[in-house]
């Protein structure tokens, strides 16, 4: 079990640029979540996938944000036309939802820290 | 909507002593999960302990235990025999499909 991995770990970009982050979940996990964490705050939910289907999006996820999980494995989160307010840690988590509907614990990746200058 | 409140932004405890972190939550659901996560400085979020709401028995993991009061919607974390490695942000969290986190409590361990 290699855990949840995220790439890159750090990203510095200029305002107006587009950025894309990648998350690789634990291999057998069918649920994948994205959260955003600003300094000194708890993580806030952005969106989640069950396999390749995006099941819920937070109102925090503006039109500039898009997430995909095309083959039900890794996921990407893209931010277009970045703004300084997008500076945050972007966390990915994954879990296994069993056939019974029971959802196991979410395991978090190390995060991608985005700085928008 | 569900909410999670941690009223202690920071706490300090002497090494080897016991500390309790407070958490309250609000929900209209009867079946749910509660968690405490630990986030060391610049490091990954780690699950400390989980509690299923349908279980009356309080969860325990080694030096970590919870006091779950369902009627009062209270879910505190007790850390016994505090160690320097326990220094971190601690987040109380409620889960339906997604996780809703509190704002966190920064725990300092004094040598």
Image (cartoon, helix red, strand yellow):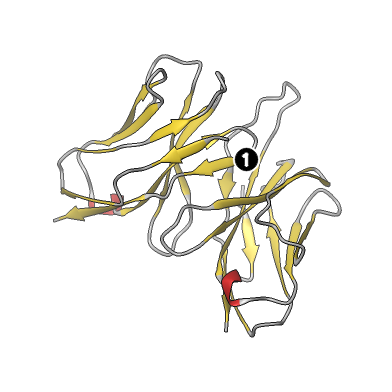
Q: Whole-percent x and y of residue B1?
A: 58, 35
**Residue A9 visible, this orientation:** no
B108 left or right of A110 in image:
left
Q: Quadrant of residue A49?
A: top right
* Mark 1 surroundings within 10 Å by alpha-carbon count, few (fewer than 14), some (14 through 19), many (20 or more): some
Q: Whole-percent x and y of residue A61?
A: 69, 57
For the image, the number of numbered tags is 1
Q: Which residue is situated farthest in the right direction here? A: A71
Q: Whole-percent x and y of residue A25?
A: 68, 51
Q: Secondary structure at mark 1?
A: loop
Q: Is residue B67 above or below residue A36?
A: above
Residue named by callout 1: B98
Numbered disc 1: what chain?
A: B
**Residue B81 visible, this orientation:** yes
Q: Whole-percent x and y of residue B102?
A: 44, 45
Q: Residue at x 75, y 61 (%)?
A: A76
Q: Quadrant of the C terminus of chain B?
A: bottom left
A105 left or right of A78 in image:
left
């Amino acid at each position: 079990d290699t855990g949840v991995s995220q790439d890159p770990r750090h990203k510095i970009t200029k305002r107006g640029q587009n950025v894309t982050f990648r998350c690789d979940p634990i291999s057998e996990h069918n649920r994948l979540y994205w959260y955003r964490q600003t300094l000194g705050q708890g993580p806030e939910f952005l969106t989640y996938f069950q396999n390749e289907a995006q099941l819920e999006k937070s109102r925090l996820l503006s039109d500039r944000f898009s997430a995909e999980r095309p083959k039900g494995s890794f996921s990407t989160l893209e931010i277009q036309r970045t703004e300084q307010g997008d500076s945050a840690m972007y966390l990915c988590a994954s879990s296994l939802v069993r056939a019974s509907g029971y959802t196991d614990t979410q395991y978090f990746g190390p995060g991608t820290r985005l700085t928008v200058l | 909507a569900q909410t999670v409140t941690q009223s202690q932004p920071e706490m300090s405890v002497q090494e080897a002593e016991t500390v309790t972190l407070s958490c309250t939550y609000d929900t209209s659901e009867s079946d749910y999960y509660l968690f405490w996560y630990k986030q060391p400085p610049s490091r990954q979020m780690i699950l400390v302990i989980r509690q299923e709401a349908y279980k009356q028995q309080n969860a325990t993991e080694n030096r970590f235990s919870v006091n779950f009061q369902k009627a009062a919607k209270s879910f505190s974390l007790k850390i016994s025999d505090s160690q320097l490695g326990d220094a971190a942000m601690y987040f109380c969290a409620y889960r339906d499909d997604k996780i809703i986190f509190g704002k966190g409590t920064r725990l300092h361990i004094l040598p």
